[in-house]
Amino acid sequence: MTSRVESLCLEKGLKMTGQRRIIAKVLSESDDHPDAGELHRRAAAIDSRISLATVYRTVRLFEEVNVLERRDFGDGRARYEEATESHHDHLIDIKTGRVIEFQSKEIETLQRDVAQKLGYRLIDHRLELYVESISDGDG
Amino acid sequence: MTSRVESLCLEKGLKMTGQRRIIAKVLSESDDHPDAGELHRRAAAIDSRISLATVYRTVRLFEEVNVLERRDFGDGRARYEEATESHHDHLIDIKTGRVIEFQSKEIETLQRDVAQKLGYRLIDHRLELYVESISDGDG
DNA sequence: GTAGCTGCAAAAGATTTGCGACCAA
DNA sequence: TTGGTCGCAAATCTTTTGCAGCTAC
């Protein structure tokens, strides 16, 4: 009944409207990286009275309270995913568009080192690997 | 007289118009990461007859022939810089917006390993470090 | 010459916002 | 009750494009 994302929102003290509950549910059930239009489509399938403007307002709100993470894979629109405790990065198959999540403690350590060497403290980072399947290459 | 970027364009066999020569010059003299509007402003300072549409068409052309690299720092507009032989990544000071370029062979090796472990060949990547100066922190 | 380039202004696509009606706490 | 939220449509912002005239090769 109460979705994972909705619980998070309640913890943060957000007022939960019908629309927000639906968007929270859609996000909880998505394990891909939908954009605003796709979220709207999925939400509208549950309740067609929901507007795209509300989707935009809601994802912005959810992002501000760290319930949601905004991603930008360089195709001109933002994509969203549930925030996770453990950070992860993305590997994007340029042929199929498939997105795989991964973690690398080694890379993160090196990032911190690079920042420190230049006199900075690492606050956040973005890493995307654009790849091609080894089996369907030009070999 | 002939800018670095213009030489590159000639090597690639591009037809060089007055507008392209000016944009090439602006790019050659820029060591930051200007967006299309900023390029237009700098180009228009040399010859005010240049249009924003031409700037967009030109950066797209230059990018296609690998004279220019398009960057996306997540603020909704693309930024451009001269293509370099050696790859580099970016460190962005979130307080000042200053962008510093860096290289890390170690990180790139690890990226290749990550992709390979998941069954992919690394084609390209994007890495940005968002940082804060150590001296003006919250300490 | 002519294929390709340019400026202008309109179009397109993503996202934001003003406003009056509506609803959760 | 009432401040926050919603839907709608219009506005914004970045980037692209149709068209008629112009220019490099």
Image (tube, coloured by chain):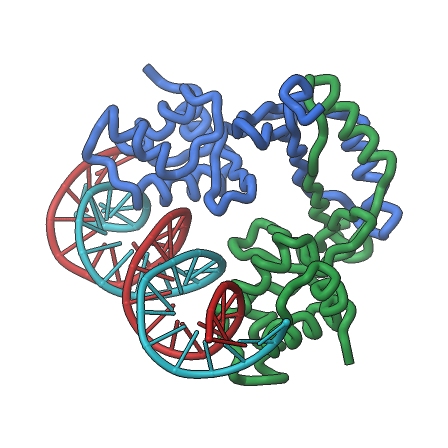
Chain colours: A blue, B green, C red, D cyan
Residue A100 shown left or right of residue C25 in the figure: right
**Image quarter hosting the N terminus of chain B:** bottom right
Instruction: Determine the residue positioned at 43% across, 31% down.
Output: A34
Classify B28 as above or below A33: below
Instruction: Determine the residue positioned at 73% across, 66% down.
Output: B5
Which one is nearer the viewer's eye here, A76 or A5? A76
Classify B38 as above or below A37: below
Q: Residue furthest top?
A: A1
Q: Position of residue B19 (x, y in %)?
A: 59, 76
Q: Quadrant of residue B6?
A: bottom right
Instruction: Determine the residue positioned at 61% across, 25% down.
Output: A85
Q: Position of residue A36 (x, y in %)?
A: 39, 39
Classify C25 as above or below B98: above
Q: Position of residue A38 (x, y in %)?
A: 36, 33
Residue B24 showing in the rendered view: yes
Instruction: Determine the residue positioned at 76% across, 30% down.
Output: B111
Q: Quadrant of residue A88?
A: top right
Residue A88 showing in the rendered view: no
Q: Position of residue B34 (x, y in %)?
A: 64, 65
